[in-house]
Image (tube, rainbow, N blue to C red):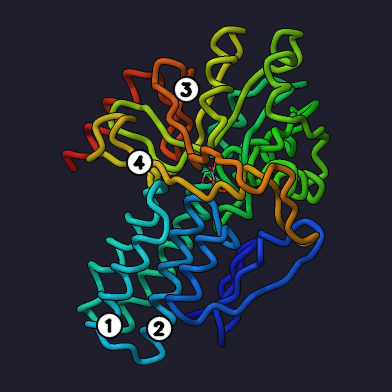
């Protein structure tokens, strides 16, 4: 496999390495990833995360293992186990399917497919960035949720890719970064990326979005997606649905930004999207480079769905790599994808 470099994933010619997102922003530690068990653990701990990047990391690991001499039978079994690492982001399943389709063709085909998926994600990100930036007016104040940038993709990102491109064009006055409870992908990771990009930003707690919208401080909401169903409903980091309801009430445009690899044309609607349930400890405290803190009573119960579903009716536009769609447009586009 040739050398490949993304913000949080790299292959230097010898070993696949992952930037440990659990330790960001205070420590930048690259971890070697040479086995299926290691990658599954890193995905489950969110050391590697973000729908597109999870899929790319699985593809690259399969190519690496093929080069190390793993048999086709073993590679197929490994692929099936990687598929189950996280249930909501469909990019993982889509990329595993893309890899399974070439495993019988041998090592060169497997490596070529993984490299192509990596390059494709970079190019899809660039297209989304351009499509989305064109929608934004100069002086835009944008609210975003979770982390959807270079840390979550092989390229410039989805919603953050749009923000970065709009910033490059001089259109961004302010980004409101939702901290994104419980795992703080906004406060830790998006803030880190805004800092690196030189984008003016302020972190807010998730509960502050409504008052900013009421006060006319938000011109658009941009979020990513983990799975878009055939009717345009989509799953994204928990808290996205709250934002969509608030944006609808305050008549703030609400856009979802995602590559075609996030579309699940077989999924009829949001109610059919599997939602990952995570540990109560994540809600009862926080962990990271500073150690583990639990502020709730040790015996407290907590509800922790990692994602929620936003109905298509609350979405102003779907910014895909292929264009910007309204509600009828996205349904028609996905129906056409399914036929193809
Ligand atoms: O649990 P995470 O941090 O992997 O959740 C990530 C998100 O919800 C992102 O918005 C989504 O994956 C799109 S990333 C380009």
The circle drawn on residue 263 is 4
Real-space Cα separation, disc 1 to disc 3, in angstroms? 42 Å
**Mark 2 lies on residue:** 65
Does the residue at mark 1 contact the one at mark 3 (Cβ under 8 Å)? no
- Determine if the C-beta at disc 4 is less than 8 A from ligand 1: no
x then y, percent, for residue 263: 35, 41
Label 3: how many residues lie within 10 Å, few (<14), some (14-19) or many (20+)?
Answer: many
Q: Secondary structure at mark 3?
A: strand
**Which is closer to the viewer, label 4 or label 1?**
1
Q: Secondary structure at mark 1?
A: helix
Query: Is 236 located above or below residue 152 in the figure?
Result: above
The circle drawn on residue 74 is 1
Q: Secondary structure at mark 4?
A: loop
Location of the C terminus by quadrant is: top left
Label 2: how many residues lie within 10 Å, few (<14), some (14-19) or many (20+)?
Answer: many
x then y, percent, for residue 38: 50, 75
* Left/right of residue 111 with respect to residue 38 in the rendered view: left
Q: Residue at x 49, y 71 (%)?
A: 39
The circle drawn on residue 159 is none
Which badge, 1 or 3, comes first in the chain's sequence?
A: 1
x then y, percent, for residue 302: 55, 39
Query: Is 22 located above or below residue 180 in the figure?
Result: below
**Mark 3 lies on residue:** 317
Real-space Cα separation, disc 2 to disc 1, in angstroms? 10 Å
Does the residue at mark 2 contact the one at mark 4 (Cβ under 8 Å)? no
Which badge, 2 or 4, comes first in the chain's sequence?
A: 2
């Amino acid at each position: 496999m040739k050398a490949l470099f993304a913000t949080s994933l790299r292959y230097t010619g010898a070993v696949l390495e992952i930037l440990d997102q659990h330790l960001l922003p205070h420590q930048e530690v690259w971890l070697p990833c040479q086995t299926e068990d290691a990658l599954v653990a890193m995905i489950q701990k969110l050391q590697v995360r973000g729908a597109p990047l999870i899929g790319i990391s699985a593809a690259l690991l399969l190519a690496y293992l093929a080069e190390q001499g793993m048999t086709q039978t073993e590679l197929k079994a490994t692929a099936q186990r990687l598929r189950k690492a996280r249930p909501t982001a469909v990019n993982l399943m889509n990329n595993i399917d893309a890899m399974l389709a070439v495993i019988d063709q041998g090592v060169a085909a497997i490596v070529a497919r993984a490299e192509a998926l990596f390059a494709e994600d970079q190019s899809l990100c660039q297209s989304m960035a351009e499509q989305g930036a064109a929608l934004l007016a100069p002086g835009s104040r944008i609210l975003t949720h979770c982390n959807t940038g270079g840390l979550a993709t092989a390229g410039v990102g989805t919603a953050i890719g749009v923000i970065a491109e709009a910033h490059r064009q001089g259109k961004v006055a302010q980004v409101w970064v939702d901290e994104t409870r419980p795992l703080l992908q906004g406060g830790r990771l998006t803030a880190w990326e805004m800092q690196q990009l030189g984008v003016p930003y302020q972190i807010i707690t998730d509960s502050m979005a409504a008052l900013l919208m009421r006060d006319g401080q938000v011109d658009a909401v941009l979020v990513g997606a983990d799975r878009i169903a055939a009717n345009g409903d989509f799953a994204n980091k928990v808290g996205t649905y709250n934002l969509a309801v608030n944006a609808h009430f305050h008549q703030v445009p609400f856009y979802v930004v995602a590559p075609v690899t996030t579309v699940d044309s077989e999924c009829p609607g949001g109610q059919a999207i599997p939602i990952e349930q995570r540990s109560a400890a994540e809600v009862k405290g926080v962990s990271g480079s500073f150690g583990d803190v639990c502020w709730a009573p040790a015996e407290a119960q907590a509800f922790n769905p990692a994602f929620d579903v936003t109905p298509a009716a609350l979405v102003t536009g779907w910014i895909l790599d292929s264009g910007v769609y309204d509600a009828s447009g996205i349904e028609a586009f996905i129906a056409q994808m399914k036929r193809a």
